[in-house]
Image: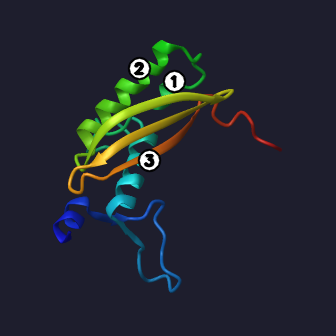
Amino acid sequence: MVNDQAFLGQGWSFPPTFSQQGAVLELVSGEEDIRQSLRILLSTNLQERVMQPTYGCELSQFLFEEVTQGLIHRLQKIISDAVLYHEPRIRLDEVIIMPHVEDLLLITLNYTLRTTNSRSNLVYPFYLTEATHLLL
C-alpha cells in the first residue's frame, strides 16, 4: 500500500491554498491528486505550458460549436489522447459526453487506478458558450 501511494503521488492542491497559519502549503495525494490533475489537464490549452507544449486538451476551440455526433467523437478522441499521454497513473476506460442543458456538455471520465485496480470517475462540465449567462 505504501508503494501504491508513492506511485499515485502527492502534489499541491489546486488552486494552491495555505494552512490557517499561512506558512504551510496544502498538499493532496492519492486519488484526489489524480482528480485534480485530470481537471487541470481538461482545462489547459495546448501550448499554454511553455515547457510542455503538448500538455492539455484545447477544448476552448469548440466553444460556440453546435453539438453533433461528430463533435462528440472529436472531443472523446482529444480527451482520450491527452489522458493517455499525460496521466500514466490511470487507465482510461471510457469517455462519455452527454448534452445536459443548453450549452453544457457533461464529460464523464471512467478510469481505473493502475496500482490499486480500483475504478473511479470524474464529471467535468464543459460550457459551450462560456461567460454568456452572467448576471449583472
Measure how far apart labels 3 and 2 are at the Cα level: 19 Å
Provide the secondary structure element on which disc 2 rests.
helix
Q: Disc 1 designates what residue? A: 62
Residue linked to disc 2 = 74
Which amino acid type corresponds to the residue marked 1 in the rendered image? Phe
Q: Is residue 5 left or right of residue 78?
A: left
Contact between labelled residues 3 and 1, with CB atoms less than 8 Å apart: no
Q: Which numbered tag is attached to residue 32?
A: none
Q: CA distance from mark 1 to mark 2?
A: 10 Å
Q: Quadrant of residue 85?
A: top left
Residue type, numbered disc 2 = Arg
In the rendered image, residue 16, in percent from the top left (x then y), is placed at 46, 65
For image coordinates 50% across by 86% down, the residue present is 21
Residue in view at x 53 percent, y 83 percent: 20
Residue type pointed to by label 3: Arg
Q: Residue furthest front?
A: 118
Camera-side mark, 1 or 3: 3
Position of residue 59 measured from the top left corner of the image (x, y, whole percent): 46, 31
Residue beneath label 3, please?
39
Tell me, yes or no, if residue 58 can be seen here.
no
> N-terminal of the two: label 3 or label 2?
3
Compared to residue 25, the image places residue 118 above or below, namely above
Q: Nearer the viewer, mark 1 or mark 2?
A: 2
| Residue drawn at (39%, 47%) of the image | 38
Res 20 visible: yes
Residue farthest right in this picture: 136
